[in-house]
Amino acid sequence: MYKLLLVSDSEEVLSAFDQIRNWELQGFKKPHIRHDYDGMLDSLGKHHADGIAIAVASSDEEERMLQYLQKEYPYTSIFQAGKDPDQVLEYLNELKTLLNRIYADFANERLPGLPERLQSCRHEFFRNLINGKVKTSEEVYRNMRLLRSRMDADRPSLLTELSMPAIEEDQLEGRWHDSEERLEMALRNSFGGDFNGMHILPTIHPDGRILVLACPLHGVEQSLTPDEMTAMLATYYAKCITHLEHFQGISLHIAGIRVLPALTVLCRDEEEKEAET
């Protein structure tokens, strides 16, 4: 069973967790409970945690906890602390689904460790976000913490479309074995990762589009205007494209760049609102 830590000074949250009586049936041990930063450190020093929930009144205290967890426990999922028993169970189920996938579903795949498994889940989530399969901004914030994404969903980002010459599916499979999956991995190796305070994530989508998401990292100051960010990334992408063509034989070019005021504009509800106006 998975082990949990709840750090909260909220009577509402503490009461909601206290009303859960069947922790084992949910797949969890009864959580360790602490109320502040020092208590969190004390618990983590004594007990393993597969998931951590934080619900404290002070935003400064919460940020202090998050910074510590990013430094010392960057792959431990941070799940939402519900304010009533139904919410608690809903968020526990989200956590359990993720943990089961990380520790069970990937057991027979060639993903060597927790960081790679969590990264694969992050890529899937952001692919869904780009495709309009995430409904609300609240889902974005909740899942980014759960998946330990370091991207800042509230700051301007860039979504770039790349195109390549049309080739037959059998040619793609012949060159890339598992076709799109292998091609996406090649793109990640060339484009992906951190660059000048931003995280770069290339994805291939069911309709064949190649999209590269670039988002500022949380806590990293970025003074660039959207135009300056676009120019910087266009130069970086051009170098990556040259590298791919030289070493992998892949010909790409930039087909378009979209400036996003925030990642949350990709949510289905936000796009529907925009379409109505």
Image (cartoon, rainbow, N blue to C red):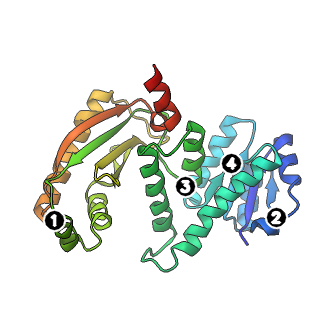
Q: CA distance from mark 1 to mark 4?
A: 42 Å
First reached walking from the N terminus: tag 3 or tag 2: 2
Q: Report the residue marked by disc 3.
A: 147
**Separation of residues labelled 1 and 3 (CA atoms):** 31 Å
Q: Residue at x 35, y 43 (%)?
A: 214
Inter-mark Cα distance, 1 to 2: 51 Å
Dot 3 and dot 4 residues touching (CB under 8 Å): no
Mark drawn on residue 23? 2
Amino acid type at circle 3 is Leu
Q: Work out whether residue 142 or residue 72 is closer to the camera in this orientation and state it.
A: 142
- Distance from disc 3 to disc 2, alpha carbons, whole Å, reads 22 Å
Identify residue type, mark 2. Trp
Q: Estimate the x, y position of residue 70 in percent, counting from the top left.
A: 56, 53
Answer with the quarter of the image where residue 135 lies: top right
Q: Earlier in the sequence, mark 4 or mark 2?
A: 2
Where is mark 1, residue-wise? 248
Residue at the spot of label 4: 80
Q: Are marks 3 and 2 in contact (CB under 8 Å)?
A: no
Task: List x then y, in percent, for residue 43.
Answer: 76, 61
> Disc 1 on helix, strand or loop?
helix
Dot placed on the residue nearer the N-terminal end, 3 or 4:
4
